[in-house]
Image (cartoon, coloured by chain):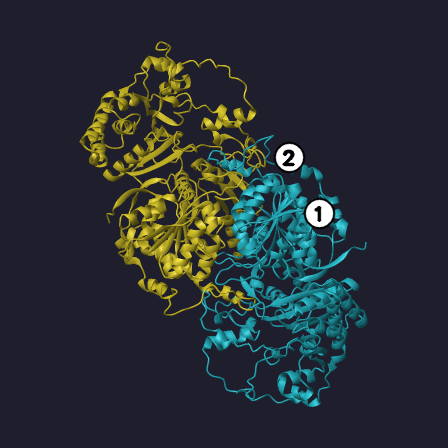
Chain colours: A cyan, B yellow
Amino acid sequence: MMRHKVTVDGNTAAAHVAYAFSDVAAIYPITPSSNMGEMADEWAAAGKLNMWGQTVSVTELQSEAGAAGAVHGALVSGALTTTFTASQGLLLMIPNMYKIAGELLPTVFHVSARALATHALSIYGDHSDVMSTRHTGFAILASASVQETMDLSLVAHLATLKAKVPFLHFFDGFRTSHEVQKVSEISFAEMRALIDIRAVRDFRDRAQNPEFPRQRGTAQNPDIYFQGREASNKYYLAVPAIVDAAMQQVGELTGRHYQPFDYVGAPDARQVIVIMGSGAETVEETVNYLNARGEKLGVVKVRLYRPFSAQHCLQVVPKTVTHLAVLDRTKEPGSLGEPLYQDICTVYSELGITKTIVGGRFGLGLKEFTPSMVKAVFDNLRHENPKNHFTVGINDDVTFTSLTVAENIDTTPADMYRCKFFGLGADGTVGANKNSIKIIGDHTDLYAQGYFVYDSKKSGGITVSHLRFGKSPIKSPYLVDEADFIACHNPSFVGRYDLLAGIKPSGTFLLNSPWTLSEMDTKLPATMRRTIAAKGLKFYNLDAFKIAREVGQGSRINTIMQVAFSHLSAVMDSQAAIALIKEAIQKTYGEKGEAVVQQNFAAVERALSALEEIHYPESWRTAPDEAISAEREVPPFISNVLRPMTALHGDELPVSALSDDGVFPLGTSQYEKRGIAVEIPVWNADPCI
Amino acid sequence: MMRHKVTVDGNTAAAHVAYAFSDVAAIYPITPSSNMGEMADEWAAAGKLNMWGQTVSVTELQSEAGAAGAVHGALVSGALTTTFTASQGLLLMIPNMYKIAGELLPTVFHVSARALATHALSIYGDHSDVMSTRHTGFAILASASVQETMDLSLVAHLATLKAKVPFLHFFDGFRTSHEVQKVSEISFAEMRALIDIRAVRDFRDRAQNPEFPRQRGTAQNPDIYFQGREASNKYYLAVPAIVDAAMQQVGELTGRHYQPFDYVGAPDARQVIVIMGSGAETVEETVNYLNARGEKLGVVKVRLYRPFSAQHCLQVVPKTVTHLAVLDRTKEPGSLGEPLYQDICTVYSELGITKTIVGGRFGLGLKEFTPSMVKAVFDNLRHENPKNHFTVGINDDVTFTSLTVAENIDTTPADMYRCKFFGLGADGTVGANKNSIKIIGDHTDLYAQGYFVYDSKKSGGITVSHLRFGKSPIKSPYLVDEADFIACHNPSFVGRYDLLAGIKPSGTFLLNSPWTLSEMDTKLPATMRRTIAAKGLKFYNLDAFKIAREVGQGSRINTIMQVAFSHLSAVMDSQAAIALIKEAIQKTYGEKGEAVVQQNFAAVERALSALEEIHYPESWRTAPDEAISAEREVPPFISNVLRPMTALHGDELPVSALSDDGVFPLGTSQYEKRGIAVEIPVWNADPCI
């Protein structure tokens, strides 16, 4: 069955489904969930109809506490209601979540899961926020990719109506919420056809209504509170089967089949990893890679985390399994182990079966989680006494929890085309890349993925875009490590960042610079020149700032660089791509008048003609290192911590480099001169009088 | 060593220690924690000095969220700070708790643990609120009695300073927070002597200070957040030993010894219960009772719940144990099992040892938890396949989770004197009983316990005071079931409540009524007369309202009934007790002038002379039941649910009697005419013109 494909991020996928189902959305934006509420608001303002033929009533409250209270109130009045949040925002909703669950009110909270502020704040993804609500009585459903976010959003909305138990549906903040993928869209009409309309009617009938007044929110004394608290047991017992049935409905519709727990791997695996969220995709990709090389490994992907159905879990775990590594993307200091780990321990404790079960933490605050780390987890399971309560992805040189990642593996399918683009915040690089993905996604059979790394300085900081294109769905929710194509959109990055790290032999390097070949001999550091030559890179240069200036676009180089990428990359036919870029220009700028359109068309043509292949000399292969200029002495924190961070090597800092309590020294910006200006004023003495 | 004894409730015990240690308290009162903050506020207003020789700066914020923020701010500025809260109040503190823990700021939050509002609100104790914070990084310490609340408050304050990890110290709301017990007090000077003053200095040195500026609360990106999150591991690893050492210090000072986990019972027990909070006292009493009758049982009392030290836990559990029942006073719908249960499963999973471990819920919303229920839990453990995920204390006739309590046992030591008093809210009964406990506690070697049951109507509702007096510390945190003495302070209760339930043969029944013996033949229901006669009760009557009126005290019968109790009960010498009551009157009313004092003295004398033993006839033994008057038909909810509740039989309602989602019908008050007025207007036609 051919289905409508769209190239969207996880937030859009969730908001699409949530909008379809909702009468009301009570919102308060918080990163990385903001877009969901904002999109719902925009759609409502534009008069978009939900599946019931009405626009959604979207209201922004004064905080997430207010949003949760409004959700509670709207539900009690019989309106199908949703909200979107993350992190501290979700924490503020906890009191109302207990009430909503206690009163058996169906709703879905869509959460782009995010770390909590502890020693420091982090706007990035992990499951600490979701795990802080696991006792509220909400069902919890986890999506691992943009496509799953679309599909399981639908499962959540279908299931909550039948089950009466409210759902928290989550996916990893930024990693999934902001990852752009080409996915199959489910239309409102298709969703509408799956709904059990009796469940909707039952919900509306339970609303507070002056015609049939009933009392809620009573105070109960010790005589009856406990009994009342147990009266909802049967609803929770029913949830796993209801979710399973909704997954079957969605599977029949889409051809994409899910279960409360899914297993991928060898049917006779001895070692498996149990995991939830986007990390499950990485493990799946790695398991497939390693099994293709003779291993017998597996992964249990947890989708329905609450209610936790031991039965559904055990159904999918092969009987042959002897060793389980349970990975949690959260940390609960002082606990015996993280929650998913303790759940799996409990499952086997109740069976009366002894397995070797170890637990580990990964990906906190969106720390990278790569196939090489997955392999380290499997390697650990092979030890006689595997390390328990480990971390993976960092170097813990203080309490020695971390696993050593001994081997770097590249699990990417051979036909995948991978690209990295270094841009400056607000220079249009990210937008241009999103546009490229959309063009390629919409006009080819290729799957496309885009993920965009910002530093915390936002406008004016560095952005690195990570793009993948391939013939099969892309299960690589981690940064591009080995790249076919790398572009540097700003010459000031040269010598500052390790731009060519991971570029494949014979790969393509595109530079925006005003330099001639001979200038490059001094402008490009020796290590860079050696890499270019040794790897035999195809090296192209373009003075995009000059073109932008000349066609009257100031410093907006996005179109120019996009054209160069489209021309150089092998992802789709260059001419067709350029034509589509022009089409997009017409669409975007048409209403601003023909002059602006022509200006952009000129940029396209100029980019194509100015793009120059650099025929670098063989001598670059042995370019001698520059003399290291002496630098004034800096405090140890600057040399040991801040400098590696600003050079994008913060991931390599060991635990001992960080303070125990999150305290940072002051006055560090004096050491952080970034020197990223493309044009700098120079004193011209001549006109002085 | 003779120590100063005081008769106080749990809140007072905690506030006493917290006040000693604190520079600052940021408060927001919420039942049942309010008194702690209010006492601190009163003490500060009265100029009471903490152990540092200063009054505590007590500030009430706009909510618990604000209180937690103020605590965080005060701690960062180097002030030793505490707060007091419960239930939803604690939930509002969660975001700041993550921050306080992440920044390694020592503090103690004293929590009178309370149920959360779910299907209904409950102001009563269970551990749902505390369990909702177990992932914040706070250490969690549990006290099971008023004495432990005093002792472990001290442990918490000592340990947090050394550990830098913040502590949540809790005890059961109402059951411990409002239970009055005679306990041994620890003076400020004694506490001060135990402090590691270097730890205090270290804390103050870490404060934000313009002389040594440092940055906190930074935003961290994926490069370093995870490493920073692991940097505090070593502090958590150190906590159990620090708590153990503080417990040893307190043990040496007081002679009362604690460990992170304490075990009581047979050294070769096969069945044990693992439990936390006041329920541990009930289990201990029951284990001692059953072991004295040949059983080999034990109880593991969890004190340091977070960080959870498997090592300390396993140290105390006998190696002979094969079956464990883990009791949680919380409910997490959708979980595999409640948190303490899952922790114990994990402990044995990590050991690679298979034990039979079952988990159960008890005491939600302060449902009674009695020795008979404890026996049912042990009985369950003896089954081939013991029930798991059970409830105990209710009748779950819907999902059949509940254990049958097959046998009623009375585990109370033989020398214990037990009393129940039925009063009307605001009639002074509770206050008089507190006074009696204080007099007996302060002037005898006896231990004393008072617990006061209010219905939710507060003023104007029924109050039942449960008092125990005995030669050994009282480990009975449950209502008085078998009573030596029962008093009914309001004649309107006769026929309405089962006043004599549980009275022991030859026990004493004291009634406040205007009735003569012959009137009693009609005023006392037949069942009551039969019980009085069959059990050979000593039955006394007193027209307290008449005396109160006559001496000019309106309807304040508290002193009168207290005098009667003191005279009739065998707890202390009657004459001495009366003298002490008079002393208390002098003290309380002295400054209101001699007339008021004499009025009260008159009430005392009149009470003594008016107290009359009722020499009831033998015929009461066979009093025939009254004819049942036909009543207009009432809705099933009224007859099946409301009527049992108002007759104080709500505990017996099965789960099926309550709605699934907490919804109640309206218009129920029309069926709830309580008829408790002592004087009612009667129409006098004569003066009409």
Question: How many numbered badges does the structure rendering display?
Answer: 2
Q: Quadrant of residue A291?
A: bottom right
Residue farthest along the front direction in this orientation: A689
Horizontal side of B491 relative to A215 (left or right) equals left
Residue B476: image x %, image y %? Answer: 38, 38
Residue B145: image x %, image y %? Answer: 37, 44
SS at mark 2?
helix
CA–CA distance between discs 2 and 1? Answer: 23 Å
Say which residue label 2 marks: A205
Assess whether mark 1 and mark 2 are in contact (beta carbons under 8 angstroms). no
Residue B444: image x %, image y %? Answer: 24, 38
Vertical side of A380 occupied by B462: above or below: above
Vertical side of A1 occupied by B616: above or below: above
Residue farthest along the left direction in this orientation: B594
Discs 2/1, front:
1
Horizontal side of A184 relative to A359 (left or right) equals right
Residue A295 is at least partly visible in this image: no
Vertical side of A334 occupied by A519: above or below: below
> Which residue is pictured at 66% across the width and 62% down the height?
A179
Write down the chain letter for disc 1. Answer: A
Horizontal side of B438 relative to A588 (left or right) equals left
Say which residue label 1 marks: A49
Which of pointers 2 and 1 lies earlier in the amino acid sequence? 1
Residue A301: image x %, image y %? Answer: 65, 56
Residue B576 is at least partly visible in this image: yes
Vertical side of B64 occupied by B575: above or below: above
Is the residue marked by circle 2 packed among few (<14), some (14-19), or many (20+) residues within 10 Å? few
Front residue of this view, candidates B554 and A661 = B554
